[in-house]
């Protein structure tokens, strides 16, 4: 497989951004090898970049690695782009993947706006480690997980790490419904088109504006 496209900078996976380069090098300083370096990047992006679905989903900045890094917050698409871009900085091939999911982690205000627990284009990152592709999802930060009773999603670089199927109490948390595949860069126009059709209340202005972490609840069923 040609790896060049998964190492080159993209419009959204902008691994040529000076800020992304500096972040990647700082986060991986002292790592013994590329495997250990990727694990450091995953942990840094998962926990230091606040998960926030309240951002304006019409703004391409919120889909771009450098934009999410600058804001220090973002939703799954932007955080996955940042992990892919940061991995490319250190020479690890990376691409972004997507699936439609039923997610029981939401907020009353978010549910009121979209009237569904199905989220289109939920994003993860695929990284080429030890001769194969492995999936990682750096979306929900540790502080958010602690608040709503979820175990933080771990990643060891060897086993796919996609989602928490259950919360700490054993109740269902997330289900994958439809795999949309992987891309070398964020397919922004396709995502935006589907979001406009499905979540029009979230497209524009400042998104929902507010603090998702303080409002989040795990709407789970036995």
Image (tube, rainbow, N blue to C red):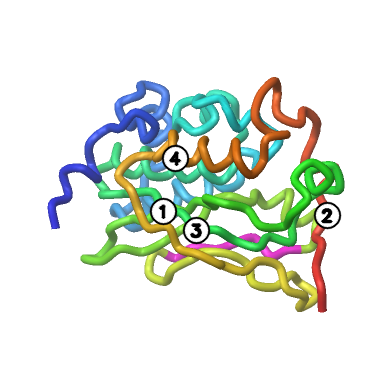
What residue would you read off at disc 4? Answer: 190
Task: Specify few, some or many for label 1: CA neighbours under 10 Å numbering under 14, 14-19, or 20 or more.
Answer: many
Q: Which mark is residue 99?
A: 3
Q: Are marks 3 and 4 in contact (CB under 8 Å)?
A: no
Q: Nearer the viewer, residue 195 or 126?
A: 195
| Alpha-carbon span between mark 1 and mark 3 | 7 Å
Q: Earlier in the sequence, mark 3 or mark 4?
A: 3
- In the structure shown, which secondary structural element does the residue marked by tag 1 occupy? strand
Q: CA distance from mark 3 to mark 4?
A: 13 Å
Find disc 1 in the rendering and name its residue: 97
Q: Name which of mark 2 and mark 3 comes first in the sequence.
A: 3
* Quadrant (top left/top right/bottom left/bottom right) for the C terminus: bottom right
User: What's the magenta region?
Assistant: 150-156
- Residue name at image x 39 percent, y 27 percent: 22
| Residue 155 lies within the magenta run | yes
Quote the CA–CA distance across marks 1 and 4. Answer: 13 Å
Look at the numbered discs 1 and 4 and tell me whether their residues touch, using CB distance below 8 Å: no
For marks 2 and 3, give the CA distance. 22 Å
Q: Which mark is residue 217?
A: 2
- In the foreground, 136 or 107: 107
Residue 102 lies in what quarter of the image? bottom right
Viewer-nearest residue: 84 or 116: 116
Q: Is residue 184 visible?
A: yes
Residue mark closest to the camera, 3 vs 4: 4
């Amino acid at each position: 497989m040609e790896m060049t496209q998964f190492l080159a900078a993209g419009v959204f996976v902008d691994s040529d951004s000076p800020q992304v380069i500096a972040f990647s090098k700082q986060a991986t300083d002292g790592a013994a090898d590329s495997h250990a370096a990727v694990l450091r990047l995953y942990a840094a992006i998962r926990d230091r970049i606040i998960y926030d679905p309240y951002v304006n989903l019409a703004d391409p900045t919120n889909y771009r690695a450098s934009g999410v890094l600058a804001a220090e917050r973002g939703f799954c698409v932007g955080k996955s782009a940042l992990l892919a871009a940061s991995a490319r900085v250190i020479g690890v091939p990376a691409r972004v993947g997507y699936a439609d999911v039923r997610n029981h982690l939401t907020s009353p205000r978010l549910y009121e706006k979209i009237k569904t627990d199905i989220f289109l284009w939920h994003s993860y990152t695929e990284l080429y480690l030890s001769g194969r592709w492995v999936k990682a999802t750096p979306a929900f930060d540790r502080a958010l997980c602690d608040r709503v009773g979820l175990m933080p999603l771990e990643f060891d670089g060897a086993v796919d790490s996609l989602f928490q199927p259950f919360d700490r109490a054993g109740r269902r948390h997330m289900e994958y419904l439809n795999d949309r595949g992987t891309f070398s860069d964020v397919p922004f126009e396709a995502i935006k088109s589907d979001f406009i059709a499905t979540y029009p209340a979230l497209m524009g202005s400042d998104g929902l504006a507010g603090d998702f972490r303080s409002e989040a609840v795990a709407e789970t069923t036995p």
